[in-house]
Image (spheres, rainbow, N blue to C red):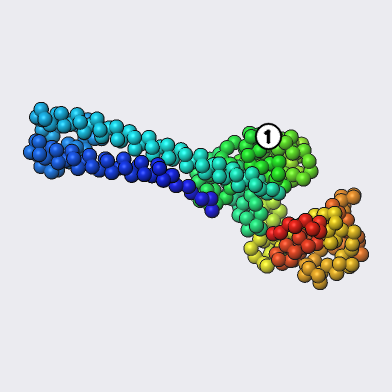
């Protein structure tokens, strides 16, 4: 959770002293009118209240000379005290908000290989949930106050600003991110963000996925720099058709791809130079027995072609991508022991 800073000791002390002074003024005012004017306790308290709060109602009863002087005195002191408490309270709130933003920005600045989600609507919330369940670091960009409050309560790092702004993407750590997910409600906004992001990160290590509501926007998003464009409407229609045509296959894939259904994952892992699998075949490593996982596909970096159900004798080279099916712990072992360069010292 993102810590919620409290006012500093000095500010708290000043506010408490001011509040105590106001309480004392109410008591002194009530006692003063009771003694000087001979009013009842209720009338005396009421007169004190409307005087200190500057409501401006007429006096309870006509005041004597001493009563008028007393009213002037408590008004001057009370209004000044009220103004002091209000100014210090506002200052404390502003300071706390600035502190929270700086603290969050420092946390974002320490991230690397994280995912940036632009838009925290229904789709953005689902994407964020799945990525967090998969134990990936995320930063959300959304300008709405209510969503910023939701994100803060959930302990999710976010930048509250316009996603189309270059500075906003920089604050979210675009230079260090491995993925950008565009789920803004307007296709035009997604196109603009994709274009801006690709200008900042022209390298292939930033993978951009964009949602589209209109089929005509797909080509625009791809030209703007998106690597993959997804239409929820088309996916929903295809899913319905596949469920009817191949119910058992659909059920199996739902279990494989669901992040919280079965105790195994389908994951892609890139082979680094100097890692255990670099330059060796699956048979040499005895991959399935060693890691308790299955390689269902290999994309050879040299010619960018997929090999599904690869031959165990196929050599694996640095830069190749493995599609692995196995338990979450096995996937973590493969990522660290099998695909990372030996001696990198990286732990998860």
Element marked by disc 1: helix
Q: Is residue 213 left or right of residue 7?
A: right
Which image quadrant is residue 63 in?
Answer: top left
Badge 1 density bin: few <14, some 14–19, many ≥20, Cα 10 Å: some
- 250 relative to 208, above or below: below
**Residue 244 visible here:** no
Kindly identify the residue that appears in the image at 79 percent across and 58 percent down. 343
Q: Is residue 167 left or right of residue 218?
A: left
Which image quadrant is residue 40 in?
Answer: top left
Quarter holding the C terminus? bottom right
Q: Where does the image place residue 33, in percent across and percent down from the top left?
A: 13, 37
**Residue 92 visible here:** yes
Q: Where does the image place residue 18, in percent across and percent down from the top left?
A: 31, 40
Which image quadrant is residue 41 in?
Answer: top left
The residue most toward the left is 38
Q: Where does the image place residue 254, in percent across and percent down from the top left?
A: 69, 62
Q: Is residue 78 left or right of residue 145?
A: left
Q: Where does the image place residue 70, in percent across and percent down from the top left?
A: 16, 32
Kindly identify the residue that appears in the image at 52 percent across and 44 percent down. 100
Kindly identify the residue that appears in the image at 62 percent across and 45 percent down. 108
Q: Mark 1 = which residue?
A: 192
Which residue occupies the foreground of this view, 58 or 341?
341
Which residue occupies the foreground of this view, 303 or 58?
58
Kindly identify the residue that appears in the image at 19 percent across and 42 percent down. 27
The residue most toward the front is 10
């Amino acid at each position: 959770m993102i810590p919620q800073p409290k006012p500093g000791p000095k500010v708290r002390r000043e506010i408490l002293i001011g509040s105590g002074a106001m309480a004392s003024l109410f008591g002194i005012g009530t006692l003063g009118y009771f003694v000087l004017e001979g009013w009842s306790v209720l009338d005396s308290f009421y007169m004190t209240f409307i005087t200190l709060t500057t409501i401006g109602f007429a006096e309870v009863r006509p005041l004597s000379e001493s009563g008028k002087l007393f009213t002037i005195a408590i008004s001057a002191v009370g209004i000044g005290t009220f103004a002091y408490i209000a100014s210090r309270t506002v200052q404390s709130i502003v300071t706390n908000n600035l502190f929270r933003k700086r603290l969050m920005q420092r946390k974002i600045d320490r991230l690397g290989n994280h995912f940036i989600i632009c838009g925290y609507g229904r789709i953005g919330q689902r994407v964020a949930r799945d990525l967090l369940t998969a134990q990936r670091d995320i930063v959300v960009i959304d300008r709405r106050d209510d969503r910023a409050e939701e994100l803060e309560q959930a302990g999710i790092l976010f930048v509250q600003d316009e996603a189309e702004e270059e500075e906003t993407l920089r604050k979210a750590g675009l230079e260090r991110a491995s993925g950008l997910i565009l789920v803004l409600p307007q296709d035009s906004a997604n196109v603009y963000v994709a274009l801006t992001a690709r200008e900042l990160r022209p390298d292939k290590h930033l993978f951009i996925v964009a949602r589209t509501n209109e089929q005509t926007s797909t080509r625009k998003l791809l030209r703007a720099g998106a690597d993959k464009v997804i239409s929820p409407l088309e996916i929903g229609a295809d899913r319905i058709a596949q469920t009817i045509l191949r119910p058992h296959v659909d059920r199996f894939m739902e279990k494989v791809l669901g992040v919280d259904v079965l105790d195994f994952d389908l994951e892609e892992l890139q082979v680094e130079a100097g890692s255990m699998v670099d330059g060796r075949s699956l048979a040499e490593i005895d991959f399935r027995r060693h890691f308790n996982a299955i390689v269902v596909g290999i994309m050879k970096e040299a010619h960018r072609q997929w090999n599904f159900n690869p031959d165990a004798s196929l050599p694996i080279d640095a830069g190749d991508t493995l599609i692995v099916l196995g338990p979450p712990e096995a996937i973590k072992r493969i990522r660290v022991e099998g695909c990372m360069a030996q001696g990198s010292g990286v732990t998860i």
